[in-house]
Amino acid sequence: MIARIGLEEISSYLFQGKAIVLFGARQVGKTSLIKKAIENFQFVWLNGDEPDTQQLLDTITTDRLRMIVGDAKILVIDEAQMIHNIGLLVKRMVDSYPEIQVIASGSSAFELADKTKESMVGRKEEMRLFPLTFKEMVNHTSVVEELRAMPHRLVYGYYPEVVTKPGKEASILDDLTDGFLYKDILNLEGIKKSAILQRLVFMLAYRVGSEISLTSLANELGISRLTIEKYIDVLEKNFLIFSLKAYSNNQDNELKKARKIYFWDNGLRNRIIKNFNPIEFRDDVGKLWENYFISERIKKLTYDKRRVETFFWRNTQQAEIDYLEIENDRIDAYEMKYNPKQKAKFTKSFTEKYHPASTQVVNSSTFWELLM
């Protein structure tokens, strides 16, 4: 079994008088992580995906729920976003029965965060679980082995089942994509134009790492800019994509409202565009590399609990910095080049204006220390 970084964190939260709320997309390993953390305790596990569980918890009192828990020390509510008033229910359990550890997990921050935010202020510890990371795989094998696997990871990504079942990557990613686009996203309230949403996801996958214009996307799809904003927000809150905003110090020649879109997993991105060709037969290796490194780096920053803001930078003369990290007053700038032989220059229009603390070209030879 591949050891997950979040195991120590979730274990440290047990029996501290707060509920544990674990966010993450389907199939990233939330169930396995929770079961590993609580394997030495009695627990009751309720699945919010099941209609009878939804009906049971819809109007249940905390006293009746306490009876269901019985002698167990832990109550787990999986896919908790499917439960009506889940935030209020968990709050009452924490307040009334602090000796019972409540763990709620969900694959949609769109639903679960909204339902727990106000009800559970001060009563929860939130965690985020991603697909596997470079560091987790290095800990499982070695740096050398994971570097050898890098061309494969750029194409198929890091979902646990994809990694642990070699030879079945494409079919597994088919199922995962269907789960994202149909079960999780299209079934959300208010998402009625399924064909348009699927086209939007396809367009974002092709344009990964490129600046996008919401107005242009809206015009191409024949819908309003506000609808595009809504759909992108839903895709982000379901952990399919994330965005980088343009960094600006209010200079006249800088882009201020632009954004780039990335996918949390290369494999899902490649499945959406239906391209699993090896990297030597592709013309989008630069995009794959940029998506891979930035997503992996942000996973690391999140797990390390660092308060780092992430951006890209571009001015109206098309000078650009691929990726920026800003922590307090420190700016670190990165340029992405998969091939170690490719050179990159950091434009003076940025360095002379912002004086970054460091500049680094991230290629397939130099990247790995930044992910450990």
Image: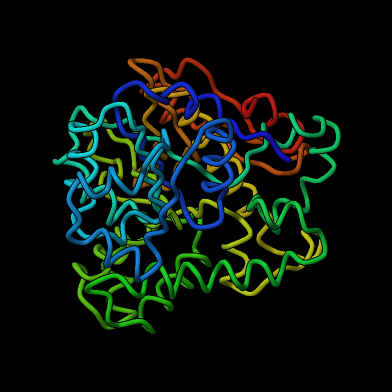
State which quadrant residue 184 falls in: bottom left
Q: Is residue 214 above or below residue 224?
A: above
Q: Is residue 213 above or below residue 144?
A: below
Image coords of residue 347 (percent x, y):
49, 32
Quadrant housing the N terminus = top right
Image coords of residue 371 (percent x, y):
63, 29
Q: Is residue 215 above or below residue 35?
A: below
- Looking at this view, is 64 or 24 the one in front? 64
- Identity of the residue drawn at 47% across and 54% down: 25
- Identity of the residue drawn at 34% across and 74% down: 187
**Left or right of 255 on screen, residue 172:** right
Image coords of residue 188 (percent x, y):
29, 70
**Left or right of 203 on screen, residue 281:** right
- Identity of the residue drawn at 52% across and 32% down: 41
Colour style of the rendered protein structure:
rainbow
Looking at the image, which residue sits at the far left?
Answer: 118
- Looking at this view, is 356 or 19 the one in front? 19
Quadrant housing the C terminus = top right
- Looking at this view, is 246 or 155 the one in front? 155
- Identity of the residue drawn at 39% across and 57% down: 238
